[in-house]
Amino acid sequence: MFDATCDLIVIGAGAVGENIADRAHRGGLSVVIVESELVGGECSYWACMPSKALITSVMALDAAKNLAGSREAVTGELDVTAVFTRRDSFTSNWDDKGQVDWLQGAGIELIRGYGRISGVREVTVTGPDGEVTLLTARHAVAVSNGTTATVPDIPGLRDAKPWTSREATSSSTVPASLVIIGGGVVASEMATAYSAFGSHVTMLVRSELLGGMEPFAGEMVAAALRAAGVTILTAAATRVDRTDDGLIIELSTGETLTAAELLVATGRTPATGDIGLDVIGLEPGRYLHVDDTMRVEGVEGGWLYAVGDANGRVLLTHQGKYQARACGDVIAARALGHEVHDAPWGKHVATADIASVPSVVFTQPEVASVGLTAEQAEAQHPGKVKVVDYEIGNVSGAALRADGYQGKARMVVNTESEVLLGVTFVGPEVGEMIHAATIAVVGQVPLNRLWHAVPAYPTMNEVWLRLLETYGL
Ligand SMILES: Cc1cc2nc3c(=O)[nH]c(=O)nc-3n(C[C@H](O)[C@H](O)[C@H](O)COP(=O)(O)OP(=O)(O)OC[C@H]3O[C@@H](n4cnc5c(N)ncnc54)[C@H](O)[C@@H]3O)c2cc1C
Ligand SMILES: NC(=O)c1ccc[n+]([C@@H]2O[C@H](COP(=O)([O-])OP(=O)(O)OC[C@H]3O[C@@H](n4cnc5c(N)ncnc54)[C@H](O)[C@@H]3O)[C@@H](O)[C@H]2O)c1
């Protein structure tokens, strides 16, 4: 057994773990990071990057088809093999050498293997060949080991070995027909991609698409998917069997579907089932509850942190990396006796997780949002909320971008303080517009000052002017 001591041990070298390690090392600590699969994690190889690489070509083709003049130049079909090849380049063909080199350059020690907490500030790593390494941290252990796809307990489903997001984002073949269980973000994005690749896609949903967002977002995405040939059924799978001819899916409605492939996109499960949480009195298999500095609650001595997907606060890479910057910095500050800035919006807390999370759903149309929906705002600020809607297609910049541009913008205003609580844009290419909204929400910019942020003409950002005019400015 090899023993090593360092200041900080990070379990999981996804985007989040890399950032914790980097910030803590820059802050003056020695750091060992443990990774059981590929350095770079889910986002780099089976989530954000490959899924977006698949969809971008679909969007570019749609953009060309939606403009007279360009439309006439589109004489062929999407080259799906070329799309897969381009996707493979974004995953470096599932080779993490580039990220390992980056870790080395940053001065962070990598131990390959599966890490388990085996005592106070102690992690035991089982390597790929069974070799065991005992790591001891002088100051802290950070868990950033992510989540795995949830596979619900539907009779026959596990035995049928369905696709999860991993297979959907890494496949180099297009099933002739694809049934997707779920109506969330993964389901909607993959339905967009695979229907464009020529698969006959059927989504099995419980209710509207993209639950938790403004209802018009799910409605517009559903309408576009239907127009693209996707069937959306409000039904549950009650039994699944894989046969030599594909999958047979029995539904709660009494119908039976057959499909070449089945994708399960029903959310995520924390990967905390087998990382030794029981050794320190925590319940395995659950998200680790943390304070705003990412310190796990209920651990004596406060040496354990959980960051990114592992704490379940927000399952998005950019928020996880934001938490990681705060966490890496605060671990270094606490270790070295420096001042800790843990008041809301301080350097060492992830306040934006609560107040203003931006996200973009890469469907066609895109959904870009930040902060609260109208319903959430009304629940938190009863009687003090005004909702302003505007058709983005009425803005010159949008009309120029696509013939017959269809899109909708909503801003949710606190009428007492006259600041924005939330913004949602739905439409082609709105993803790039959301950062202005994030700045306005985080900065709590008063509307009468936002009025002076004049959008350039003729860009789609002129929707801001129209929203403010509609509000009454
Ligand atoms: C299909 C899909 C598309 C997505 N698209 C987006 C997007 O466009 N934008 C966005 O912001 N978010 C997106 N997400 C969410 C995003 O992927 C996650 O929020 C992000 O990957 C979380 O990062 P993480 O570092 O916390 O965890 P992960 O990326 O899951 O990394 C955890 C790492 O820990 C390792 N590990 C696990 N257990 C151990 C152990 N015991 N010992 C050692 N190593 C261990 C794993 O191998 C992994 O490398 C998407 C998710 C999915 C499923
Ligand atoms: N563009 C992006 O930023 C992006 C893209 C993909 C994923 N993500 C992140 O990854 C996370 C996981 O995505 P996801 O789509 O798997 O989860 P999700 O929470 O977005 O959607 C889960 C869907 O599955 C349904 N569902 C849950 N249990 C079910 C069951 N037993 N039977 C049938 N349906 C069931 C839900 O009703 C919902 O429609 C998301 O929370 C999101 O934060 C982000």
Image (cartoon, rainbow, N blue to C red):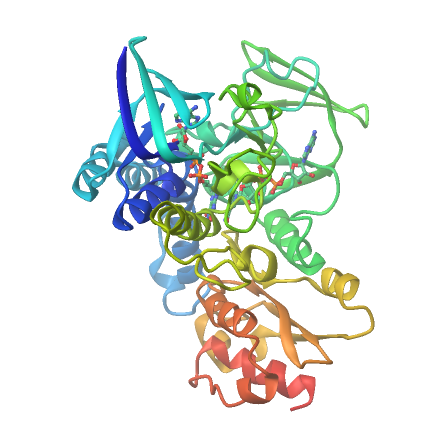
Q: Image point 53% across, 69% down: which residue? A: 442
**Image position of 356 (left or right of 348):** right
Q: Quadrant of residue 109?
A: top left
Is residue 85 something one can see in this rendering? Answer: yes
Q: Nearer the viewer, residue 443 or 148?
A: 443
Q: Image point 51% across, 19% down: which residue? A: 274
Compared with residue 411, is residue 253 higher up or lower down, i.e. above or below? above
Quadrant location of the C terminus in the rendered image: bottom right
**Image position of 309 (left or right of 140):** right
Compared with residue 470, is residue 348 higher up or lower down, i.e. above or below? above
Q: Nearer the viewer, residue 446 or 81?
A: 446
Q: Image point 55% across, 51% down: which residue? A: 292
Q: Position of residue 315 (x, y in %)?
A: 53, 44
Quadrant location of the N terminus in the rendered image: top left
Compared with residue 160, is residue 290 higher up or lower down, i.e. above or below? below
Tally the numbered discs: 0
Q: Nearer the viewer, residue 372 or 434?
A: 372
Q: Position of residue 9 (x, y in %)?
A: 36, 32
Q: Residue furthest front?
A: 337
Ligand 1 lies in quarter: top left
**Image position of 133 (left or right of 154):** left
Compared with residue 458, is residue 70 higher up or lower down, i.e. above or below? above
Q: Position of residue 371 (x, y in %)?
A: 61, 63
Is residue 38 something one can see in this rendering? Answer: no
Q: Position of residue 63 (x, y in %)?
A: 43, 61
